[in-house]
Image (cartoon, rainbow, N blue to C red):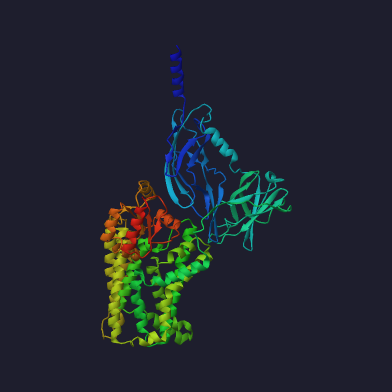
Amino acid sequence: MFARLVLLVLALACLTPFPAMAQPVDTGHLQAQLVPQTRSVVPGGMVYVAVVQDIDPDWHTYWINPGDVGQATQLVWHPGPDVEIGEAVWPVPARILTVAGEDRFSSYAYEGRVITPIPVAVPAFATPGTSLPVRLSATFFVCSDTLCIPESAELSLELPVRSERPELDRRWGALINQALAVAPAEGDISGRVSSTTGVVSFAFAGPALEGIDADGAYFLPDRPGVIDQAAVQRVERGPRGLILSAPAAQTLVPLTGSVSGILATSRGAWTVNLTAGPPPAGSFGRGSAQPASLTGSLDPSAGIGLWAALGLAFLGGLILNIMPCVFPILSMKAASLAATSAQPQAARREGLGFLIGVLLTFLALAGVLLTLRSGGEAAGWGFQLQNPAVVAILALIMLAAALNLSGVFHVGAWAQRLGAEAGDSLEGPLARIGPWAGSALTGALAVVVAAPCTAPFMAAALGYAVTQPAGTALLVFAALGLGFATPFVLIAFSPMVISVLPRPGPWLSRTKAILALPMYGAALWLGWVFWRQAGPGPVLVLTGTAAIFAAAAWVYGRRQTARLEGWTYPPSPVVLAILICLSGVGLVWAATAPREVAGAGADLGAEAWSTERLTALRAEGRPVLVNFTADWCLSCKTNEATALSSRRVADALARTDTAYLLADWTRRDDRIGAELARHGRSGVPLYLVYPADGGDPEVLPQLLTEGRVVSALEAAAASRD
């Protein structure tokens, strides 16, 4: 009889509705799951589900505003038909302060267990006895003091639909209710924001704040670019509120008239929307209060000062002139100087024009880069060559420069003639536009093609620049451009160097034809990069476009020389216009064709890099060599063709049982961009050798020798002992 009673109880328990929950998903450094507030739902009702993060010790994830570093957790929902998902109720994050040299960075982060409730509206027509599927894709940016890894999880939950009143889920119902109780509330609090002399003030007043002492209060904007998030917020008390003040952010994100965020106090936390205006009555008048402190972590090796960054940037720009990336541009520099050897004033003008073009282009690229990064993009130095359309355009520009040096046509004649005519009529500086424009364009082209490769000293300077306010960052990029242009400018302004150059003559045309060869090589290299990015189909279209473009250049050149050579019927301008239009159509077609990209790095026998693969290899106790590279980085390709592909290095890899991972940044990859930033870099190349004992990686020089690589591999393997 007792056994039958037990079986009856178990049967009734099995008939009781329970939400179907998947097991927690282990993403690597946290466990994530989607859990319900109640054991069932009713048609037309509302229920909370929650994303639960159980984060490993010494790791953390981020709030919707991650602060100065990190990335916000992303939740992408895939609900069933007519299921409405509300806004996530995030708990108040902790403020983590990181000190790097003289710089301070603040993050808004979570540690341990994090419960984030989200309201779900059940459709009124949901049928009792069925279940309501709720699914989402979650991406967490999980960081320790030294490492940040993007990790993802697919979470799902089946909510049984019943007609009776739902009961709390036995495991999670009370925990979700507790999370809702302590989460920031929507209280009756009015808020005003104002900004004067570089300081932003947030004023709050309302019944919930009446008589508050305000010690330790602070305000968390829900987006970056409002205040200096690492600064201490000054607190002023009032009878019915308080005022918090902090230095304004020095970023490219403008401060608008409305700011939202969380006001956190010892009495509780509230979500507040502040509008522009003076402080409300009752928010001030009772003196100051004790400001809140930030929890801190210290990394004395990270970060450099402004003056050190400027010096490193200048040295990096100087060294960039001898990097493989710049070799094609040397042809244009040499040809322009040789043409002005008999005119010191013209040589100086060439030097200044080149300097102006270099500086303006460096600053323009830096401005775009900083704007992308301020918008949350993981862009890095060299981002322009990650776009196949830009690569295709640069390939045609290089081809045009080569054809010009070969004498197929003459660039600049129209601009100089226009300048002369303007000078005759206006007697102004417009007469000198043509000569200046050519040298400035040479400098601009040199930067666009050559700068993506980072030279020694550049890496630390660029890594510093992209973490600084816009004004400081632009100073560093200007120092980089100044270093890059200095050798050419010094030669152009040196009477001794100019005097030893032979006078212009027939030899100059022959020399230009020889100097055209590197330009043809640069066009072929860019075509190869385009093939790696877009595949064989689009590169065939680009090749045809280049042929049509060359024909257009030839027609233009024939029209330039028709009168001198006594041509009775020069090529028609209609033919030239048709060829130019066909070139444009071909360029658009090639740049927008579907991609058919093959995996990069197969010729080196490397595995594709990922944080998961790196972690697995290190868990096996193996040394790991990681090569952060890109096909548009000639320095990277030079190292791979010499040091990394030598027999001696291959033998060392096999002898030490070292795994070789390739992180290919030819096309944009936010994971690689984030990993570069974690190592203080904003571009490639970067070479890391991880020791077998699990210690920190060794950073190899940007110009490799096989001996240096072999010694690093042997040292990494020796750590196993």
Q: How many marks?
A: 0
- On screen, residue 281 versus residue 164, left or right, reads right
* In the image, residue 418 above or below residue 665: below
* In the image, residue 124 above or below residue 583: above
Residue lying at the far front in this picture: please name it.
721
Q: Nearer the viewer, residue 339 or 80?
A: 339
x and y percent of residue 275 in the render? 62, 54
* In the image, residue 456 above or below residue 610: below
x and y percent of residue 700 in the render? 38, 61
Q: Nearer the viewer, residue 558 or 20?
A: 20
- On screen, residue 345 versus residue 596, left or right, reads right
x and y percent of residue 669 in the render? 39, 55
- On screen, residue 485 versus residue 580, left or right, reads right
x and y percent of residue 516 in the render? 29, 76
Q: Quadrant of residue 136?
A: top left
Q: Nearer the viewer, residue 113 or 533?
A: 113
Q: Nearer the viewer, residue 703 or 244?
A: 703
Residue 556 in sight from this viewpoint: no
Please report the residue visible at 40 percent of the width from the left and 81 percent of the height from the top. Answer: 491
| Quadrant that contains the N terminus | top left
Residue 371 in sight from this viewpoint: yes
Residue lying at the far top in this picture: please name it.
1
